Amino acid sequence: MTTAAPIQPTPAHQLQPFLSSILDDATKNQGSPVPRGPVRSNLIFYAPPADGATPFNYVSDPPAGQPKNNFGSNVQQININDVRGRESQFTLANNAFQVLSGIESEEKDFTDDEHIKRVYYPEVEKLLLDHVPGANRVLLFDHTIRRSNPNASRGPVQRVHIDQTPKSAEARVRHHLPDEAEQLLKGRYRIINVWRPLNGPVVASPLAIADSASVRDEDLVGVEHRYPDRTGETAGVKHRDGQVWYYWSGMKNDERLFLQCSDSENFSGRVPHTAFVDPRTPEGAPGRESIEVRALVFG
């Protein structure tokens, strides 16, 4: 499949006037103005292990004497363009991400995992079937809630990454649907994350996403994702001039972001992403809370 050319970013000379402070005073989260428009901020990219070893990351506590991970960081200042006002320009097919608005949910609290699976999962499944061309079957295999407070079990991840690789996507099919895997792997299968805020509009720690058409295969590095009982694989992302970055300013609770991590029919259809610190974030702004649901999408 031919990869689409990346959508043109905002030119640097046009970006400069926005770098000081753009705050939307009309839309407020608990009294905090929402940063809008293009911004320049630090993103944390992958750097290889100093000893040349295979990169790894332990999901839970590592064995005694082992570090949590063995790779480094490469911090780069990046121009990040705003999707707000141009939502219809982005599709899974061309950019590996897509945005939707006006999506209501019966789930309000997001504090009970079983209630989330019973109430919110069917909504996400229908959303994917309705909005992913060709999709005929969806299996939601997990979710993560992130909250920006010291006691939260998971917070926003400030490292550029992709949750799955083609290798781990195939492994997911075999792991979750072992009796049907051989047949399902003959057709198209994708992994798509459905991301939304829980306390929108987002003021702090927004999510940056790269246009997949601007990301080369050589920018990606497989990282062993070590669970207690098995090993998966995520992708670290190396910085390269020419990568084009976006965020969706002030995401609200009725908005959804599709992040495609892997596509068996288009290996370039994968989207690096990361939380980032917006330098315009007002002092004392509420920390971002969000949920991402991960799905195997067939067809």
Image (spheres, rainbow, N blue to C red):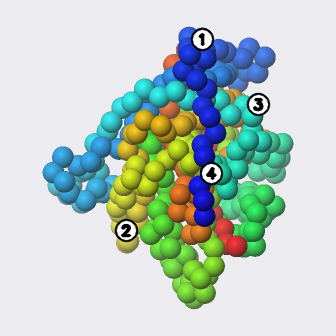
Q: Secondary structure at mark 2?
A: strand
Disc 2 + disc 1, Cβ < 8 Å: no
Around disc 2, counting alpha carbons within 10 Å, would you say few (fewer than 14), some (14 to 19), or many (20 or more)? Answer: some
Q: Residue beneath label 3, please?
A: 85
Earlier along the polypeptide chain: callout 4 or callout 2?
A: 4
Q: Residue beneath label 1, please?
A: 17
Residue at horizontal 54%, vertical 37%? Answer: 244
Earlier along the polypeptide chain: callout 1 or callout 4?
A: 4
Residue at horizontal 15%, vertical 51%? Answer: 51
Q: Nearer the viewer, residue 154 or 275?
A: 275
Q: Residue beneath label 2, please?
A: 231
- Image quarter of residue 89: top right
Residue at horizontal 68%, vertical 34%? Answer: 83
Q: Residue beneath label 4, please?
A: 4
**Residue 237 image label:** none
- Image quarter of residue 22: top right
Q: Could one spot residue 147 in this view of the protein? A: no
Real-space Cα distance between discs 2 and 3?
41 Å
Disc 3 + disc 4, Cβ < 8 Å: no
Amino acid type of disc 1?
Pro
Amino acid type of disc 3?
Gly
**Residue 129 image point, x, y percent:** 77, 64
Real-space Cα distance between discs 4 and 2?
33 Å
Real-space Cα distance between discs 3 and 1?
18 Å
Q: Secondary structure at mark 4?
A: loop
Q: Name the mark nearer the viewer: 2 or 3.
A: 3
